[in-house]
Every structure is written in C-alpha cells, then in structure tokens.
Amino acid sequence: GINAMQEKNGVRLRAKKKLIFYCAFMAYPVLQFLIFYVFVNFNSILLSFKDIDVYDYSKFTWTLENFAVWFKDPTLFESMMRAAGVSLKVYGISLVVGVPLGLFFSYYIFKRLPASGFFRVMLFLPSILSCVVLVSIYMSFMNNVFADILKKVFHMERKIDFFSSDRRFATVMFYNIFVSFATSVLMYANKMSSISGEIIESAHLDGATGFKEFWHIVLPMSFSTVSVFLVTGVAGIFTNQINGFVFFGATTNNETLTLGYLMYVKVFSAKQNVAEYPPIAALGLMITLIAVPLTFLVKRLLDKYGPKED
C-alpha cells in the first residue's frame, strides 16, 4: 500500500512538473503577444471608435464613422481600393518570383556548387545596411551608372528614367525582391542542411537526382520552413509598404502605393494632429480583421495540402 501511494505521489509530482514547464515555456510567446500586439495596439483600437475634438484632444465621442468614411469619401475609397490592388499585386509577384528564386539559391548553396559561399555572403550583405542607405545607393546606381551603361551600349539618345511613372513599380519590386532574399535564403539553406546525407544518398541510388531530388526529397523536408514564410507573407500583404516611403516620401500619387504605404502617408500628413488619427486607426483595424482569418486559412491549407516528408 505504501509503495502504491508513493508511486501515485510520484506520478502527480511528474505531472505537476510538466505543467510548470509548459506554463513557463508558453509564458514567453504569450507575453510577447500581450506586449507587442495588445499593449502597443490598444490605443490604436480605441482610436478607431473615437471622434476627437480638433480643439481639445482630451475630448471625444464614441462613433463608427471612422470606418464608414473610407467608403463614403470617394477619394479615400479610391485610394484604399487602389492600394489594396497594389498590395495583392506585390504579394503575387513575391510569391511567384521571390519564393522560387529563394528556393533555387538555397538549393544551390545546399549542393555546395561553385561560388555558393559567395552567394551566401552577397545575398546577406543588404540586411547589414540601413534601408535608407540601400535605397539611396540603389536609386543612384539605377539612374546614373546603370542608365549610362544602357545608353552607351544601345546608343540611346537619352538615359532611361527607371523611376518614371511607367517603370517605377517594376524598379521598386526588383529592389524589394533582391533585399528580401537574405533571410529566406539563409533560413531555407539552413533547413536543407539539416537533411540527412543518408536520405540523399538513398534517393540517388533510386535514381532521384537533380530536379527529382529537389522536388521529392529536399522541398518536402524543407516545407515546414517554407510554409512559415508563406504564412507570414499573407499576414503582411496589407502592411508591407515595400520601402515606398523611403523611395518617394509622403505622396499618394504613384504606382507603388500599397495599404501599408498609404497608412504611412496618412500618418505623416497628419503631422501629429491627433484628431486625424482615428480614421487611419480604423483602416488598420479593418485590415487586421481581414488578415487574421486569411492567415489562419492559408496556414490550414498549407498544413493539409502542402508536401509531406513521408
């Protein structure tokens, strides 16, 4: 009887320790969520429902007009819809171009082909420098060095303006895809490097080389990392401002105006006039209400239909 009691107490103690470990382990992400989302955005959420007195910021009334104004005002509605279209376009290009290129370079590094070490360093370099510095270098290079080279090679009468209205979007997207390589390529390559050499060798014995090796072995075993970037990419569709504010400043009259960029411009134009913040906060809340369920839906679809290791 004593042994049974001691064994029962031991089981309870182990269960209690597991519970303590679980709570301690989960405390960190929960604390992150509370601090960096709830606490940071709490005032913004409240602002969405406030009509602030322009003469006395401490006075306000509760209202839903901040949400309605984006649909009632033709100018705001047009800006919002155009920005939403550009945001989806940016995500589509990043998905179709950026993700495959990232996987290609990662696989190139994983196979340790010639100059793979150089590619790893070269692709990581942009993440070291400030985006303001990078954008300045990029704009100068495109409109001076690269434009001069094209002019001389193709005997053009004048240099190409890569930031004119008809080329601006493509030029900015090229920049964003290039600088976004660093994190994704390193993460993909690190995940690929964890694949057992025995599995690769076994696949080679079965005749799986080249593309078959990548498609049937490397991609499924790296898909957990790829899916993280795909899911976070969906979450960032409506907040990505593709460095537009750094390129062009506070202007809504350009082809790179995403929803994230639009909110940057609106906040900057308000010039600390708190009374103008509520409609911007309302737009952010509407975006969140769309992005959250969409993100969970994409994650569920990827978990269900994505490549499996088995």
Image (tube, helix red, strand yellow):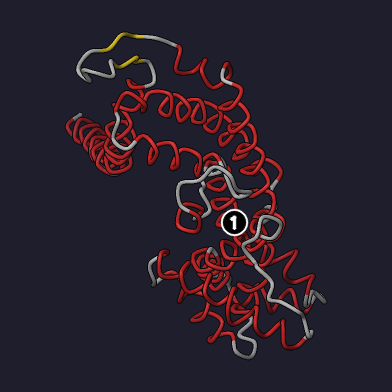
Give 201 or 245, whichever is nearer the viewer. Answer: 245
Return the residue nearer the eye: 30 or 168.
168
- Rendering quarter of residue 170: bottom right
> How far from the left and from the top, in percent, is residue 21?
26, 43
Image vertical order of residue 173 relative to residue 128, above or below: above
Q: Tell me the SS state at disc 1.
A: helix
Q: Residue furthest front?
A: 157
Judging depth in this view, the residue of 124 and 4 nearest the camera is 124
| 301 shown above or below 93 | above
Relative to 25, 196 lies left or right = right
- Residue depicted at x 60% and y 50%: 256
- Asked if residue 213 is positioned above or below residue 55 in the image, the reply reads below
Q: Is residue 6 above or below residue 170?
A: above
Q: Circle 1 sits on which residue?
A: 226
Q: Quadrant of the C terminus?
A: bottom right
| Residue at the far bottom in the pictured view | 114
Residue 190 in picture, x, y percent from top left: 51, 70
Image quarter where the N terminus lies is top left
Residues 69 and 27: in front is: 69
Percent across and percent down for residue 254 are 60, 48
Q: Please name the residue shown 51% across and 53% down the image.
A: 244
**Residue at coordinates 54% horizontally, 86% vertically from top-left?**
118
x, y percentage for residue 246? 45, 57
Kindly identify the amino acid type of the residue bearing the numbered disc 1: Val
Q: Classify residue 4 as left or right of residue 99.
A: left
